[in-house]
Amino acid sequence: MKKINLKEDHLQIYKRENSNVWQIKIKLPHKKALRISSRTKVLEDAKNIALHKYNFFIKERKNIDKNSEKNFQYKKIHLIESKNLKKNEIECFLIESNKYIKFNKQNIKKSNLLKGRTVFNLFFEDSTRTRTSFEVAAKRLGADLINVALKDSSINKGETLFDTMTTINSMDPDVLIVRHPEEGISKKISKIVKACVINAGDGSHEHPTQALLDALTIKKKFGSFAKLKIAICGDILHSRVAKSNIEILSTLGAKINIIGPKTLIPKDIQQPNIKIYNNMKAGLKNCDIVMMLRIQKERIVGKHITNEKEYFNKFGLDYKKLGYAKKQAFVMHPGPMNRGVEIDSKLADDVTRSLIQEQVSMGVAIRMACLEILINNKDKYGS
Ligand code: CP
């Protein structure tokens, strides 16, 4: 066999006895040797092809090594709650999202950062934005994403949720993204699996990636949180988005006005930067942002609201009520919206005042950052 060393033992070209075509062998330290055909019989061409391939693999390796050295301020492998997140941990997600905002504006949106990683979407409740944006995020980073069709799963045959989770865990996933109507379920799952767990909404409890994407949207518009007054309006009692936003936005330094009917405001909100109002005119005064929330019809038990028209008149946001806030105040809504119940349809679509589509766009960037940070931490610190 003819053999030529081009980079000592790391790069060789060789010809087998029974072939005229040059073969390439690349052996990087601590990696299995890679053998590929140069598809040429000409020695000089084979050398050039081999060097080109070698340089490509070295560059890829450097990218992988660079990433594995990353030391993020957020060091946990799960993202379950916004409660107890420190300011520098929240900022870590916002800072890392910036590069993905730019990346998502490119024509070709494909990276190999998470190539070979496996992400499971486990949605036990309906979702459009969260489920699809995690799918887009994972695929743009090169990961394999599996949407588990839980409506057709063995849960219907009586399998417990925890048996389903341990079954999926045995397939060695990297991340499980869980939405479930039961409060605290993501935390319980995180204790029995090796994969990273992201809470994509657990009942009326928390939805941390929604609050992070809301914070990113606000940061992009206003730059900082210190002087901001943000109104969060509507069904606070049943809203996991409200709970996560109250934690994250107040930790970032914003003042928060909670506005809604008495029956839809939890009794236990007592934080220095938060004021509670049952009247839109008083609550919206001097606000920079008005975040409207959906009436969570599926979670409302008993008579929290009398009728939708009356609710809209008192607590629904239209141009008139937006006029009680600052002149240039912006409107946000996590979606899905009940048009004409908590928000006027025209106002929701008014891109000069509404950040709703921007929120969806930021959702992809923040979820890309979440996947990168958690998988990096799993590699670095283990499960
Ligand atoms: N905001 C939000 O969680 O939307 P989906 O229910 O569509 O995921």
Image (tube, grey):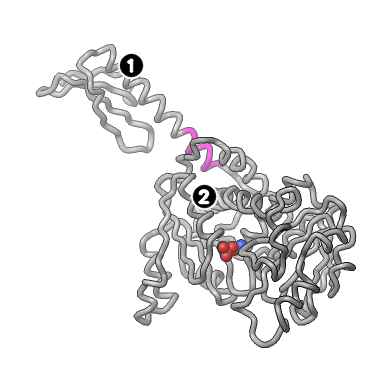
Q: Secondary structure at mark 2?
A: helix
Q: Amino acid at mark 1?
A: Asn
> Can residue 184 be seen here?
yes
Answer few, some or many: residues within 10 Å of disc 2's Cα (few below 14, many 20 plus, some between 14 and 19).
many
Instruction: Please count the marks in the image.
Output: 2
Ligand 1 visible in quadrant: bottom right
Residue placed at 80% from the left, 70% from the top?
Answer: 259
Q: Position of residue 238 (x, y in %)?
A: 67, 75
For residue 14, above or below residue 109: above
Locate residue 288 relative to residue 237 in the image: left or right. Answer: right
For residue 360, above or below residue 267: above
The verdict on label 1 being within 8 Å of ligand 1 is: no
Q: Which mark is residue 48?
A: 1
Q: Which mark is residue 137?
A: 2
Is 280 one of the magenta-colored residues?
no
For residue 163, above or below residue 56: below
Residue 223, located in which quarter of the rendered image?
top right
Q: Position of residue 365 (x, y in %)?
A: 59, 48
Is 63 one of the magenta-colored residues?
yes
The quarter of the picture where the N terminus appears is top left
Residue placed at 82% from the left, 63% from the top?
Answer: 256
Residue placed at 84% from the left, 75% from the top?
Answer: 278
Q: Nearer the viewer, residue 355 or 70?
A: 355
Q: Position of residue 225 (x, y in %)?
A: 80, 52
Locate residue 122 relative to residue 367 in the image: left or right. Answer: left
Q: Nearer the viewer, residue 62 or 363?
A: 363
Magenta span dominant secondary structure: helix
Highlighted range, magenta: 62-69
